[in-house]
Image: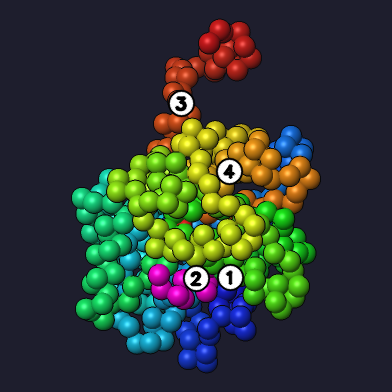
Amino acid sequence: MWKGLIHQYSQLLPVTEKTPKLSLQEGNTPLIPLETLSEKWGIDLYVKYEGANPTGSFKDRGMVMAVAKAKEDGSEAIMCASTGNTSAAAAAYAARAGLRCIIVIPYGKIAMGKLAQAVMYGAEIYAIEGNFDNALQMVRNLSEVSPITLVNSVNPYRIEGQKTAAFEVCDQLGSAPDVLAIPVGNAGNITAYWKGFQEYHDLYKTGLPKMHGFEAEGAAAIVRNKVIENPETIATAIRIGNPASWDKAVEAATTSNGKIDEVTDAEILDAYQLLAQTEGVFAEPASCASLAGVKKHLDSGEIKKGSKVVAVLTGNGLKDPNCAIDTANFSPIQLPNNENVLFDHILGRVAH
Ligand code: F0G
């Protein structure tokens, strides 16, 4: 039976006998081959489906480690700024560990499913009239003058937990892929994957992928090489204008011969629908920046035909139901409660 990341990777994580065996059985997520798109695009394409984690995003990997260490160190409260997923994971693991959880979010800019999670797990929620970058600055400042443990990805235990996804990719494929495509927001996850691939390669000679990170065009601070004061994108999870792990993301891309690039909201939404409709895989919009980026780099020749490519799908599509309904332009065909009328429609006897 799978017992979660702290159990599975205790040798490769900062775990001691005193570390609580905290777990919601996170990790061990599917690596799904995209057969139709592989054929169409002439590559060997897989997605690492992080939406299968207990709170529906990759954040559970980092949070289990950060919360376990906070508990081990005697902390009674954790705190984070969030575009939604970090707060959902923090709230869940805090509930599990019996800690107080404080979350600070940008008012009106987090997806409904994520907010519902934080509410259900019993977090204290503060919604500021500012963006994620403002919220992060505030909680960083507060953590310096209070005993509350900060669990954003500037907490090194978050990166430690999240690096396990790279271990799993290597185990699932038998080696690292040629290219790892990943959305970039605050830039913690690309940092974590690169650390994980390097550590696994040092131990087991699994090889190193080229790291291709993708920001949303309206929040592409790293690509533009300047802080974006008012980031905007449909992909609210990566609506971040001043990534905390900026330098580490650049280092991952540069040393791996990869690239940090940007994708437009239109490209993100195309990938979002394509993924669901041709492969049966539903991931939230920010996640689809990775797939949109793969398409962009195939078209530009920056990913070669025949490459083995893994795109990380960071969060579950159900996190943001409003985006799905709105972008699909969906309005139901409303019918009376009458079998004959229904049959006429289904069997094409009525023009739509
Ligand atoms: N994808 C999703 C679904 C996310 O929620 C995030 C970050 C990212 C990608 C980007 O990861 O920040 O490590 O580069 N969400 C954070 C949050 C900021 O608060 O949930 P990153």
How many numbered dots are placed on residues in this image? 4
For mark 2, does the 10 Å Cα neighbourhood hold few (<14), some (14 to 19), or many (20 or more) residues?
A: many
Q: Amino acid at mark 3?
A: Phe
User: Alpha carbon of mark 3 to alpha carbon of mark 4: how far?
Assistant: 26 Å
Along the line of sight, the residue nearer the viewer: 120 or 310: 310
For mark 1, does the 10 Å Cα neighbourhood hold few (<14), some (14 to 19), or many (20 or more) residues?
A: many
Tell me, yes or no, whether the highlighted magenta stretch contains residue 155. Answer: yes
Mark 3 and mark 4 residues within 8 Å of each other at the beta carbon: no
Mark earlier in primary sequence (2, 1): 2
User: Alpha carbon of mark 3 to alpha carbon of mark 2: how far?
Assistant: 39 Å
Q: Position of residue 325 (x, y in %)?
A: 44, 33
The residue that appears at 28% across and 51% down in the rendered structure is 131
The residue singled out by tag 3 in the image is 330
The residue that appears at 54% across and 63% down in the rendered structure is 251
User: Alpha carbon of mark 1 to alpha carbon of mark 4: how far?
Assistant: 21 Å
Mark 2 and mark 1 residues within 8 Å of each other at the beta carbon: yes
The residue singled out by tag 1 in the image is 195
